Image: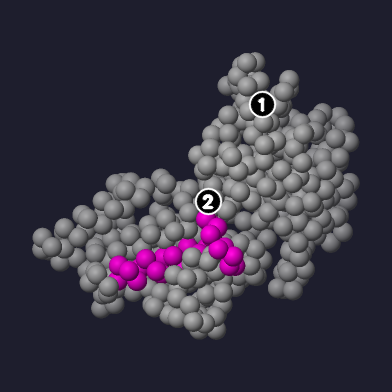
């Protein structure tokens, strides 16, 4: 985005700053994508890490806050925002320290707190998020261009909503920490601040039905009326491209919308395996009571895991189309999942989803003839090309992987240690790892199931 802006505005840019993960600029150059790097108008703060908060997150936030605060009437601040900013940029509310913020971030990640819930807590502990940057820039105008890794309706809240407010409250942040039993584990200063802000909000009744003004701490509101937020890219664009390609190949395909989108990797893997069983049952369907009973049973299981009857009917429809045409079925999922940290391994949500799916597919494969009669392949990738901070985008998965012993350990042992990266690195010399290099774009994770009847 920075390079495009530089090419468009050229010398009109007075000052440019890009806060990016450590090493990402060099990684773009090394992967032959140096044309994505701005040439002269941007200063890079690339000491950050997009997966955790640390000192450089605070120094970066202070630096860009200083620029915003220096602006005056007639100036224009253009912000280019994509996923990862919640941890790349951190400016804790006083009296919180950076250590307090780092502690609560790590606790949320290790306890599987959903991404949207993490973002809500971030905003209520931050001076710069939840519209804070826009407020600092006033009276200057702010134009924010956003590449979204969130559902479309929440796109303005990417990276904690640096230029956009919402109706989240300190009380909701407290409830999220309590939901995951973090009330006693989080720093006392964090709990005390949220409780104080929640009480102040309640007593002053400052939550109003306005898209631009919300309570953001004692005795003040945040006003983002100086801001225009433009969502330039979402996962919907990528999904449309996949659907178009499938259509050209004659492959029945569907984007599956999950009502329970904030799941962890184990739950997501189980759901993907369950849906795979459902589709294979439809592709191998025989008109007898035993087959119909199996289909109804797995359909109910999918519903319990958050699928709607409407979505399942659509999956059944395209499965029937695929059966009639003797073509594979392609199902596309683009919900964010979290990793529940239990071990000390290396990986990311996409690789861990792939490994969990492989294990659950194997468990079902032994018991269900429909799965045995079909080929099920899963592609699980992070759209930015760096899943969990590793140098791979994700992995390809199938049930046979779960049978493999890799360096003396089972697939389940790797999963239990959150070590999906090393499982796939050493399995068939990394054959199933997907390496794209950094893409410069973050528009959610993608899981693509491709299922075909082996007899076709």
Which quarter of the figure is the N terminus placed in? bottom right
Asked whether residue 251 appears in the rendered view, the answer is no
Tell me if mark 2 has few (under 14), some (14-19) or many (20+) residues whose alpha carbon lies within 10 angstroms of its own: many
Q: Is residue 64 above or below residue 3?
A: above
Residue at the (77%, 34%) spot, across then down? 95
| Foreground pick, 252 / 66 | 66
Q: Position of residue 392 (x, y in %)?
A: 60, 70
Q: Position of residue 196 (x, y in %)?
A: 66, 25
Q: Is residue 88 above or below residue 319?
A: above
| Sequence-wise first label, 2 or 1 | 2
Residue ID for mark 2: 112
SS type, badge 1: helix
Q: Is residue 445 above or below residue 58?
A: below
The secondary structure making up most of the magenta span is helix
| Foreground pick, 38 / 356 | 356
For the record, the magenta segment spans 339-365
Which quarter of the figure is the C terminus placed in? bottom left
Residue at the (75%, 37%) spot, across then down? 96
Tell me if mark 1 has few (under 14), some (14-19) or many (20+) residues whose alpha carbon lies within 10 angstroms of its own: many
What distance separates the C-alpha of mark 2 from that of mark 1? Answer: 25 Å
Q: Is residue 367 left or right of residue 118?
A: left
Q: Position of residue 50 (x, y in %)?
A: 69, 55
Residue at the (33%, 59%) spot, across then down? 275
Residue at the (35%, 50%) spot, across then down? 305
Give the residue furthest to the top: 204
Residue 168, by quadrant, is: top right
Q: Is residue 184 left or right of residue 316?
A: right
Residue ID for mark 1: 197
């Amino acid at each position: 985005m920075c390079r495009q802006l530089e090419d468009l505005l050229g010398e009109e840019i007075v000052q440019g700053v890009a806060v990016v993960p450590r090493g990402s600029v060099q990684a773009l150059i090394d992967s032959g994508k140096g044309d994505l790097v701005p040439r002269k108008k941007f200063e890079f703060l690339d000491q950050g890490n997009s997966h955790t908060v640390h000192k450089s997150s605070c120094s970066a936030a202070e630096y860009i806050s200083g620029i915003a605060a220096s602006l005056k009437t007639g100036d224009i601040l253009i912000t280019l925002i994509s996923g990862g900013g919640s941890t790349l940029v951190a400016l804790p509310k006083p009296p919180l320290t950076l250590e307090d913020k780092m502690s609560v971030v790590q606790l949320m990640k290790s306890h599987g707190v959903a991404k949207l819930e993490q973002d809500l807590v971030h905003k209520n502990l931050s001076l710069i998020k939840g519209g804070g940057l826009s407020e600092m820039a006033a009276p200057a105008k702010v134009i924010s261009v956003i590449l979204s890794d969130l559902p479309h309706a929440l796109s303005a809240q990417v990276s904690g909503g640096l230029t956009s407010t919402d109706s989240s409250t300190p009380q909701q942040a407290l409830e999220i920490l309590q939901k995951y039993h973090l009330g006693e584990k989080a720093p006392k200063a964090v709990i005390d601040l949220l409780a104080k802000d929640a009480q102040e909000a309640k007593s002053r009744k400052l939550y109003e039905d306005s898209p631009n003004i919300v309570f953001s701490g004692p005795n003040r509101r945040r006003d983002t009326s100086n801001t225009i937020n433009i969502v330039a890219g979402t996962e919907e664009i990528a999904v449309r491209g996949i659907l178009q390609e499938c259509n050209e190949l004659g492959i029945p395909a569907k984007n599956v919308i999950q009502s329970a989108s904030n799941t962890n990797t184990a739950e997501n893997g189980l759901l993907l395996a369950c849906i795979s069983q459902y589709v294979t049952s439809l592709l191998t369907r025989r008109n007898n009571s035993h087959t119909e009973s199996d289909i109804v049973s797995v359909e109910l299981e999918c519903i319990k895991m958050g699928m709607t009857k409407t979505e399942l009917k659509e999956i059944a429809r395209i499965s029937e189309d695929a059966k009639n045409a003797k073509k594979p079925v392609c199902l596309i999922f683009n919900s964010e999942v979290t990793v529940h940290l239990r071990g000390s391994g290396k990986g990311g949500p996409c690789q861990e989803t792939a490994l969990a799916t492989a294990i659950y597919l194997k468990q079902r494969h032994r018991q269900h003839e429909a799965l045995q009669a079909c080929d099920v392949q899963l592609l699980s990738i992070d759209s930015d090309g760096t899943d969990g901070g590793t140098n791979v985008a994700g992995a390809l998965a199938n049930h046979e992987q779960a049978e493999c012993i890799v360096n003396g350990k089972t697939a389940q042992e790797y999963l239990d240690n959150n070590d999906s990266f090393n499982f796939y690195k050493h399995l068939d010399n990394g054959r199933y790892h997907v390496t794209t290099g950094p893409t410069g774009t973050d528009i959610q994770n993608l899981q693509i199931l491709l299922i075909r009847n082996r007899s076709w």
